[in-house]
Image: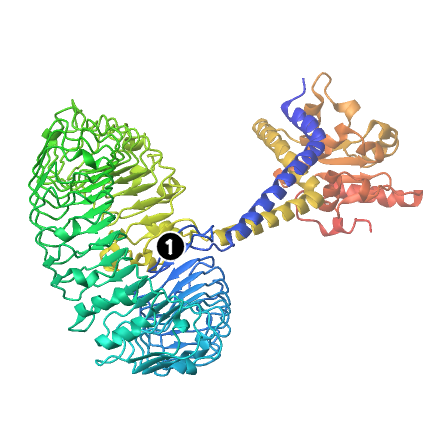
Amino acid sequence: MPSLWTRIIHGTFSQFPHQFLKMERHILDKVCIMSSCLFLCLIMWTVPAEGYFIRNCTVHGSLNYTDRLKVLCYKMSFHQVPSDIPHNTKVLDISINYISQLKEGNFKNLTNLSILNISKNHIGFLEEGVFKDLMSLYEMNLAHNALREISGGMFKGLNNLTELNLGYNHIKSIEPSTFQILSNLRVVNLSFNALFDIEQIREVLKHFRLREIYVGGNNFSDFSTEKISNLSLNVQVLDLSYNPFRYLKITSDIFPNLIVLDLSYSGSKNGFQWEVKNTSFVSGVKRLFLNGTHVSYSQMQSILRSFSNILEELYLNKLQSQTMQDYLNVTCLVLPKLKVLSLQNNKFISLQKKQLEYCRQLEEIDLSKNKLQNMSKTLFQGLNRLGFLNISYNNLTAVPNATQNITSLQTFDLSYNMIKHLENYDFMNLTNLRYLNLAGNVITLITGSLFSNLFNLQVLKLGSNLILSIQGPLSPSLGKLEVLELRINKLSSIKNSTFLYLNSLKELNLIDNQISSLEEGSFLGLQRLKALLLGSNKLTRDTFRKTDVFTGVTGLNELQFFDNYLSYESTDKLSYPPFLSLKFLNRLTINSQGHNGLLNFPSNLLEGLTSLKELHAGNLNINELHPDTFSYTPMLSFLDLSKNVLSTIDSRVFRMVSSLTEFILSQSRLESLDFLIRANLTKLKVLRGKRNELNTINETLIRSLPLLKYLDLQQNPFTCDCDNAWFVNWSLSNPHTQVIYFNKFRCGYPPNLKDMTLESMRTDSCVVNINLICFISSTTLVTVTLVVSFIYHFLRWHLIYGYYLILAFLYDKKHRFQNKEKMICYEYDAFISYNTKDEPWVLRELVPHLEDTEGWKLCLHHRDFEPGKPIIDNIVESIYKSRKTICIISRNYLESEWCSREIQLASFRLFDEKKDILILLFLEDIPTSKLSPYYRMRKMVKKKTYLKWPENDKGTRVFWHKLNVALNAEEGYKKDPYINDLNEN
């Protein structure tokens, strides 16, 4: 059986080249794939991302949709326009800041911007071309700034602008060509500037698309159509209010389309001169404002006659005249088509019948904010079209008799008077009334018969009174009532069947009373009620011990129960969950319970609320939530738990609310948000956690909220170290989530960085440079690939030979130690390694010359090998028993496997014993390319110690001499000078 060494050399080496080539191709394929992946990785990591974060601004909408993106930067102390506005912004508000000038490039690339508000800044300079990129802008507000002049190229590029507000500046001059480039302009506001001549706005008025112009509050002393144009204009609304006119002259028909004219607070203390050459020049005016003017009785008549038979709405609020009541005598007489008359704030104390006797066409009268105490019983007699009457904010102590018979009345506002009592007959004949407002009086009692015959009433407001009780069910006449407001009164309880007949009621507002009990059947009859507001009362848990508290309102959508006195001793299940029957409830507000708060949130408090979508449960003084708290509310999408003491929350609490989209946890003393990682809130879009004890936000947390759009974590003591490095970079660069006011986040730790902004923390030393790693990795991989390929192509056989040489060395080393132990001496002068086909030459030439002539003792296969012993063992022993090994190299020798083994074994004495015992003897010329890698290696190593058999007889003598010298040479790497000379050229 062959030895281990034989099996290794013979089996493995003979198959290895083919296997190596196959393996190399496989490895190279993988290397190429890996190199490509790393290269792509490098490219991907170098692509910059557009961030969602804007300093001191909030973004409403998604960066991916241009139709809804709104950026709000108002009231943020900006001194210049933010440079990081998203390019697809639709609405931009940077009002109420300290911006003093606008320069070209401030709005670069905002080509989708439609609405721009830059009002209430300090802008005094607009560089030409500053708006050139805003080709989609249609509304711009530059009001309340410091502009002094408007130049020709100031609004270049605003071809689609339709509305421009330049009010409340200091504009003194307008270049005529300014508005010519605004081809779609429809509305211009130049109110409250320093313009002094009406000719300054002539070119504006002549704009062919202009429909509305507001130039009130300037210094125009006269208005004459002769100074404006000879052609008809398209203006429909003209505001000339707050100007010190001496006269207004309309002497030509340039306003054929004018509908609204505002002359409020115009003229001097002596009024102004009014001249209309032909009433047809103002024949289109339907609405006229003369509020606050100082016009005499005769001046008023002159003005009103110009609009006779055409005017429909007249506003005479706060007139500066002692004879205001006299105006009423002629107003309706001169204006027979008048429909709307507003007389607010004119200090009326009483009104008599004759003052409105000609106002039979009136549909709306506003007498609010006067000092009315009484009215003539027949004041509104004959006003059969009156549908709106407002007498709020007066001094009436009772419902006027004058209003009892206005059968056409639909809206009646008596709020904020001094009415104490209501009588059954007050509204007896107002059968068409739809809206009745009695809020802000001093009413103390409501009876069931008060609102009889109000069959069409839809809204009844009784808030802010002193109502102590409601006696008996409210009138069956209120069958169409949809809204009943009883907020801010003194009600202490709701009696059984109080609202029994309000079958159409949709909203019942009982906020801010003193209700401490709800009798059984309090809400009977309210089967259509959608909103029940019981906040700010004195209701306790005892209120819900009755199982039928909400009998009659099972279709309720909204229940407000904030600021009451609800509390529980533990989180244990309740025997009678209070909301069990409200299966359609969508919105529940139970925040801010009085005394010590709710204290504990019973595990089944929300049982039955299977449709609940919005829950406000902040400021309840609870410190834990039972895992089953929200197991009854699978549709919950909004949750407010702010202002509680929830230092930690069990993630199991959220296992049934996977639809949650907005979560508020502000001021809850939370130290970590990691509970959200396992909460499975994959649909969460808004997360607010202001004023907590949060230190770090990790990547795992953010990745667990894939749809997050708004993250508000202001006023937390963040740790400014590498634990937050990822969060800082993500906040600044991610395009999907807006970290609201991230630039205001401050460091709480370490102490030396306290109050430094988190945004300014350097993260260079924390973040691994992926680009550099990818570059180094790819470079190294390519280099290694090239080196491996080079070695394989040029040196692979050398390496393979070296590998197997090591294996053979281990075997030989073992054999050498065995020989040393036995102290074996050399038996032969040379071991002859040859192929049997070359044996004739060995016996004919070599043996006679070396043994017979020179006396050397040779070891030959056929003669000296021990019979029956393994061949390999015979070879090894013969080599180590001989001083030298002579290899007879021929083509036959190269083809012999055993000859190859012999020359390899002989080499180990060169490497191991440092004895150069090998002599190569070439019988014929063999090209180097025909030699195996091993023989090429040996020829290279022994390039000065090999012999060649001569081709003619003349060289044989020298050949034998050289061979004899080689056999006598010293053993070792150090060469004898004489032997060196033996080498053939």
- In this rendering, the answer to whether 675 lies above or below 309 is above
In the rendering, at what x and y percent does residue 804 appear? 65, 34
In the rendering, at what x and y percent does residue 182 appear? 49, 70
Q: Nearer the viewer, residue 240 or 232?
A: 232
Q: Residue at x 15, y 46 (%)?
A: 463
Can the viewer see residue 200? yes
Is 33 displayed left or right of 872 in the figure?
left
| Residue 750: quadrant of the picture | bottom left
Is 392 displayed left or right of 954 in the figure?
left
Q: Nearer the viewer, residue 169 or 950?
A: 169
Q: Residue at x 10, y 51 (%)?
A: 441
In the picture of the structure, the residue carrying the numbered disc 1 is: 59
- In this rendering, the answer to whether 958 lies above or below 179 is above
Q: Quadrant of the N terminus?
A: top right
Q: Amino acid at mark 1?
A: Val
Secondary element under disc 1, as helix, strand or loop, is strand
